[in-house]
Image: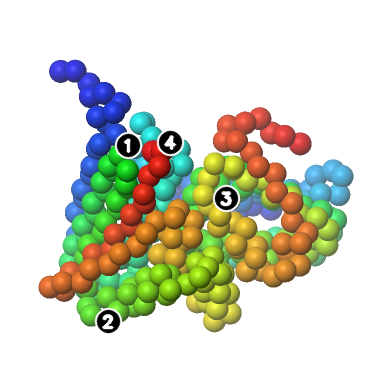
Amino acid sequence: MSEPSKEDRRRLAASLSMQPVECMTTAAAGLVASFLNGLFREVHSRRLATRIYVGVSELLTNVLQHATVRDGEVNLNLHLQPDCLSVKVQNRASIEEYEKVQAIVEALAASESPQALFVRTLRDRRDQHEEGGLGLIRLVVECKFQLTIQYSDDLLTIEAKLPLVDP
Amino acid sequence: MNEVCGRIYEGTRRVFLAQTTRSEPDTLVVSFEGMIRVDDSGKVLSGYIKELDRFLSEKTESNAILDFTKLQFCNSTGFYTVMDILEVVYRRVPGRVLIRRLVDDDWHTETLPLLLVALGRDVAARTDYQDVNEGAADVS
């Protein structure tokens, strides 16, 4: 059996389903991200592989920290095309959970400076001795992902997409 | 005591190390190695942060080097922990702070500067950056 070419290996997609959400840890999210980072690091740049790591880690952690339906599953899809990277996470969620995520995505889209939004959010949460609340903003500010969300039949899907110039 | 360390373990495996030492001439060196990916890094490293503050209260160096070149990943919850460490260093060290960072890593070039902005204007004003390629020899 011949090995696929480097070009063919660049078209690799990966899917993972884990359940229940309540049994997962953020360290486990990091391990999944490490695995996918290693898989794609073989044929892509360090920067792209790291963006995959960050995207997977933060989207999974977002589910672990905020999912209201704790006995459901979380589905992860990673798809790399020549001109675009897509990392998508889906979980069963309440309308309130969807509205919280929607508010963040809309604030990012409306913001003239996502960096300023990031700094403001960080300062506000520190002042209130709170943590969290930065994962989705980080994807946009640090890795330049574009975020979209869908909510249908109690399923919340968050997709982080990154246009690629030179993967 | 010449050294203060903070560590994060996953099981028995150490995944993160923050090491603080004194170096000549009159320079504090804090190096970060590994990954911060647990969701309670603030709690895990709270003892180190308190000890760091006490260590610097005994004798404060004029300048500092913060070496992030071996920090492979920091989750967004860890940003608050990194800021707590930075805040102690900038509060105790009156002079220039040199940050060594990886030139080809988004966290180092995009997010780390924003953590400093969040700490305040005087912090950014006395910060210098040294950009390092991953795997490059140390440049002094």
Asked if labels 2 and 4 share a chain, the reply is yes
Q: Is residue B106 above or below residue A112?
A: above
Are there few (<14), some (14-19), or many (20+) residues within 10 Å of tag 3?
many
Amino acid at dot 1: Leu
Amino acid at dot 4: Ser
Asked if labels 3 and 4 share a chain, the reply is no
Q: Is residue A111 above or below residue B3?
A: below
Amino acid at dot 3: His
Res. A97 image quadrant = bottom left
Q: How far across and how far down the image is residue A23, in percent?
A: 26, 62
Q: Is residue B88 left or right of residue A51?
A: right
Q: Is residue B68 left or right of residue A14?
A: right
> Between tags 3 and 4, which lies in front?
4
Q: Earlier in the sequence, mark 4 or mark 1?
A: 1
Asked if labels 4 and 1 share a chain, the reply is yes
Q: Which residue is mark 4?
A: A45
